[in-house]
Image (cartoon, helix red, strand yellow):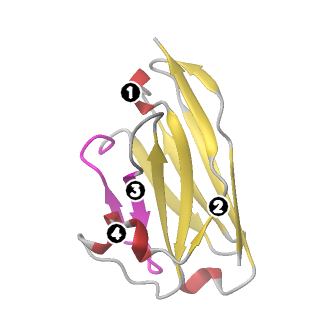
Amino acid sequence: VQLQAYGGGLVQAGSSLKLYCAVSGGTFSSYAMGWFRQALGKEREFVSGISWNSITYYSDSVKGRFTISRDNAKNTVYLQMNRLKPEDTAVYYCGADRYGILTEVSVARPDEYDYWGQGTLVTVSS
Protein backbone atom coordinates (compact mmCIF):
# COMPACT_ATOMS: atom_id res chain seq x y z
CA VAL A 1 0.00 0.00 0.00
CA GLN A 2 1.37 3.40 -0.99
CA LEU A 3 0.12 6.83 -0.02
CA GLN A 4 1.03 9.99 -1.87
CA ALA A 5 0.14 13.32 -0.30
CA TYR A 6 0.22 16.47 -2.40
CA GLY A 7 -1.34 19.87 -2.75
CA GLY A 8 0.74 21.80 -0.27
CA GLY A 9 2.21 25.21 -0.99
CA LEU A 10 2.82 28.74 0.20
CA VAL A 11 -0.29 30.79 0.88
CA GLN A 12 -1.25 33.91 2.78
CA ALA A 13 -3.18 33.85 6.02
CA GLY A 14 -6.90 33.68 5.40
CA SER A 15 -6.47 31.71 2.19
CA SER A 16 -7.61 28.21 1.33
CA LEU A 17 -5.75 25.14 0.20
CA LYS A 18 -6.80 21.59 -0.60
CA LEU A 19 -4.63 18.61 0.16
CA TYR A 20 -4.89 15.27 -1.54
CA CYS A 21 -3.83 11.81 -0.49
CA ALA A 22 -3.91 9.21 -3.21
CA VAL A 23 -3.78 5.59 -2.12
CA SER A 24 -2.63 2.72 -4.30
CA GLY A 25 -2.75 -0.94 -3.43
CA GLY A 26 -4.94 -2.52 -0.82
CA THR A 27 -8.66 -1.84 -0.44
CA PHE A 28 -9.08 1.90 0.01
CA SER A 29 -12.83 1.77 0.65
CA SER A 30 -12.27 -0.29 3.80
CA TYR A 31 -9.55 1.97 5.22
CA ALA A 32 -9.91 4.70 7.75
CA MET A 33 -7.78 7.69 6.83
CA GLY A 34 -6.18 10.40 8.86
CA TRP A 35 -4.32 13.65 8.40
CA PHE A 36 -1.57 14.65 10.78
CA ARG A 37 0.88 17.52 10.70
CA GLN A 38 4.30 18.23 12.08
CA ALA A 39 5.67 21.70 12.50
CA LEU A 40 9.38 22.33 12.72
CA GLY A 41 10.68 21.25 16.10
CA LYS A 42 7.34 19.86 17.22
CA GLU A 43 5.77 16.45 17.48
CA ARG A 44 3.35 15.09 14.92
CA GLU A 45 -0.18 16.10 15.81
CA PHE A 46 -3.59 14.92 14.74
CA VAL A 47 -5.57 17.11 12.36
CA SER A 48 -8.51 15.11 11.03
CA GLY A 49 -9.72 11.58 10.38
CA ILE A 50 -12.43 9.78 8.44
CA SER A 51 -13.61 6.25 8.96
CA TRP A 52 -14.45 3.79 6.21
CA ASN A 53 -18.10 4.88 6.39
CA SER A 54 -17.23 8.59 6.36
CA ILE A 55 -17.58 9.44 10.02
CA THR A 56 -15.32 12.44 10.49
CA TYR A 57 -13.17 13.73 13.31
CA TYR A 58 -11.31 17.01 13.79
CA SER A 59 -8.88 18.48 16.23
CA ASP A 60 -10.15 21.50 18.10
CA SER A 61 -7.57 23.69 16.38
CA VAL A 62 -9.03 23.07 12.91
CA LYS A 63 -12.69 22.36 13.61
CA GLY A 64 -14.88 24.66 11.56
CA ARG A 65 -12.05 25.55 9.17
CA PHE A 66 -10.95 22.21 7.71
CA THR A 67 -13.07 19.55 6.05
CA ILE A 68 -12.02 15.98 5.39
CA SER A 69 -13.68 13.87 2.74
CA ARG A 70 -13.03 10.80 0.65
CA ASP A 71 -13.76 9.52 -2.82
CA ASN A 72 -13.62 5.76 -2.90
CA ALA A 73 -13.88 5.72 -6.69
CA LYS A 74 -10.64 7.71 -6.88
CA ASN A 75 -8.91 6.09 -3.88
CA THR A 76 -8.31 9.57 -2.54
CA VAL A 77 -8.87 11.42 0.70
CA TYR A 78 -9.01 15.20 0.75
CA LEU A 79 -8.41 17.90 3.30
CA GLN A 80 -9.99 21.23 2.43
CA MET A 81 -8.34 23.91 4.53
CA ASN A 82 -10.01 27.30 4.81
CA ARG A 83 -9.14 30.45 6.74
CA LEU A 84 -5.56 29.28 7.10
CA LYS A 85 -3.44 30.69 9.88
CA PRO A 86 0.36 30.95 10.24
CA GLU A 87 0.15 28.32 12.99
CA ASP A 88 -1.16 25.85 10.40
CA THR A 89 2.32 25.84 8.83
CA ALA A 90 3.62 22.28 8.91
CA VAL A 91 4.34 19.19 6.88
CA TYR A 92 1.03 17.38 6.46
CA TYR A 93 0.97 13.59 6.40
CA CYS A 94 -1.80 11.20 5.54
CA GLY A 95 -2.14 7.80 7.14
CA ALA A 96 -4.26 4.73 6.43
CA ASP A 97 -5.74 2.40 9.01
CA ARG A 98 -6.54 -0.91 7.35
CA TYR A 99 -9.17 -1.84 9.93
CA GLY A 100 -11.35 1.09 8.95
CA ILE A 101 -12.89 1.93 12.29
CA LEU A 102 -11.87 4.94 14.33
CA THR A 103 -12.91 6.18 17.74
CA GLU A 104 -12.57 9.58 19.33
CA VAL A 105 -9.43 8.29 21.01
CA SER A 106 -7.84 6.10 18.36
CA VAL A 107 -8.21 8.59 15.51
CA ALA A 108 -5.64 10.89 17.08
CA ARG A 109 -3.01 8.23 17.71
CA PRO A 110 -0.32 7.92 15.03
CA ASP A 111 0.22 4.27 15.94
CA GLU A 112 -3.38 3.57 14.90
CA TYR A 113 -2.35 3.93 11.26
CA ASP A 114 -0.60 1.22 9.31
CA TYR A 115 0.61 3.14 6.29
CA TRP A 116 1.91 6.68 5.79
CA GLY A 117 2.58 9.00 2.91
CA GLN A 118 5.67 11.15 2.49
CA GLY A 119 4.13 14.46 3.55
CA THR A 120 3.40 17.75 1.81
CA LEU A 121 4.54 21.13 3.10
CA VAL A 122 2.01 23.85 3.86
CA THR A 123 3.38 27.30 4.63
CA VAL A 124 1.04 30.08 5.69
CA SER A 125 2.51 33.56 5.70
CA SER A 126 1.14 36.33 7.90
Badge 3 is on which residue? Answer: 48
Q: Evaluate if marks 1 and 4 touch, with contact meaning CB atoms under 8 Å apart.
A: no
| Closest to the observer, 117 or 66 | 117
Q: Between 2 and 80, which is closer to the camera in this rendering?
A: 2
Instruction: Say which element carries label 3.
Output: strand
Q: Is label 4 or label 2 in front?
A: 2
In the picture of the structure, the residue carrying the numbered disc 1 is 87
Instruction: Assign a secondary structure to mark 1.
Output: helix
| Amino acid, disc 1 | Glu
Q: Of the residues under marks 2 and 3, which one precedes in the sequence?
A: 3
Mark 2 and mark 3: Cα distance apart in space? 15 Å
Give the residues in magenta: 45-63
The three-letter code of the residue at mark 2 reads Gly
Q: Which badge, 1 or 2, comes first in the chain's sequence? A: 1
Asked whether the beta carbons under mark 2 and mark 3 sit within 8 Å of each other, the answer is no
Assign a secondary structure to mark 2.
loop
**Residue annotated with mark 4:** 107
